Amino acid sequence: QKEVEQNSGPLSVPEGAIASLNCTYSDRGSQSFFWYRQYSGKSPELIMFIYSNGDKEDGRFTAQLNKASQYVSLLIRDSQPSDSATYLCAVKSNQFYFGTGTSLTVIP
Amino acid sequence: DAGITQSPRHKVTETGTPVTLRCHQTENHRYMYWYRQDPGHGLRLIHYSYGVKDTDKGEVSDGYSVSRSKTEDFLLTLESATSSQTSVYFCAISETSSSGSWDNEQFFGPGTRLTVL
């Protein structure tokens, strides 16, 4: 079992819709959770981090954490074509573990 | 890229040759990391450093060694490159939080594409 699991997609949403990206992790002792965006051929860039159960909002992005279910999600509201990228979930337990990423395409 | 450079950016080499990749930061961050990224596997931690001369192994450390003689430089060496080490290599940095944990977010360099023939 992988430490961090993500649906590889591809996920397609129309412009203006809400994109929902999901991630599960195996280590209940995990402490910190991160979402990165990676454009093709580029390096990952941090979007959000979350440490506590519940929701954390930053602009059009909302991260949700449920430690009991070992589940992290990222919601992107009012999706834009520029949001088309691969989204990586990362979890810090004894070290950092990354999921394989979900490819998102926002259709104009 | 948060003051992180990697060199070379692209390299093609032959099986059995030694290869050294360099990561240089200007942020004076304590922690530095080397990852490889492969289709179907995502980013996997190779080695990391928590200070000058202080390093530890990550998830996929076999066949790799690292050194950190200065805060700003972290070197990754493939002693004898193999085709399975063909990958994109990313360096990342992070800093200690005020609480002393190392959970702070990582910032990534531009990457090095390595091909081993």
Image: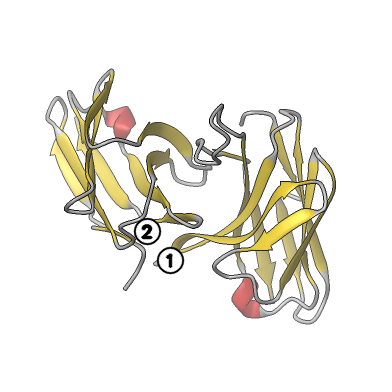
**Residue A88 coordinates in the image, percent (x, y):** 37, 47
Q: Quadrant of the C terminus of chain A?
A: top left
Q: Which mark is residue B41?
A: 1
**Snapshot quadrant of residue B6:** top right
Q: Is residue A67 left or right of residue A92?
A: left
The answer for how far apart the CA atoms under marks 2 and 1 are is 6 Å
**Residue B93 coordinates in the image, percent (x, y):** 63, 40
Residue contact at pointers 2 and 1, CB within 8 angstroms: yes
Q: Are marks 2 and 1 on the same chain?
A: no
**Snapshot quadrant of residue B80:** bottom right
Return the residue nearer the eye: B70 or B16: B70
Chain of the residue under the numbered disc 1 shown in the image? B
Q: Which amino acid, mark 2? A: Thr
Q: Is residue A97 left or right of residue A80?
A: right
Provide the residue designation for mark 2: A100
Q: Which amino acid, mark 1? A: His
Q: Is residue A95 left or right of residue A77?
A: right
Return the residue nearer the eye: B82 or A20: A20
At mark 2, the secondary structure is: loop
- Residue lying at 16% horizontally and 28% vertically, measured from the top left: A15
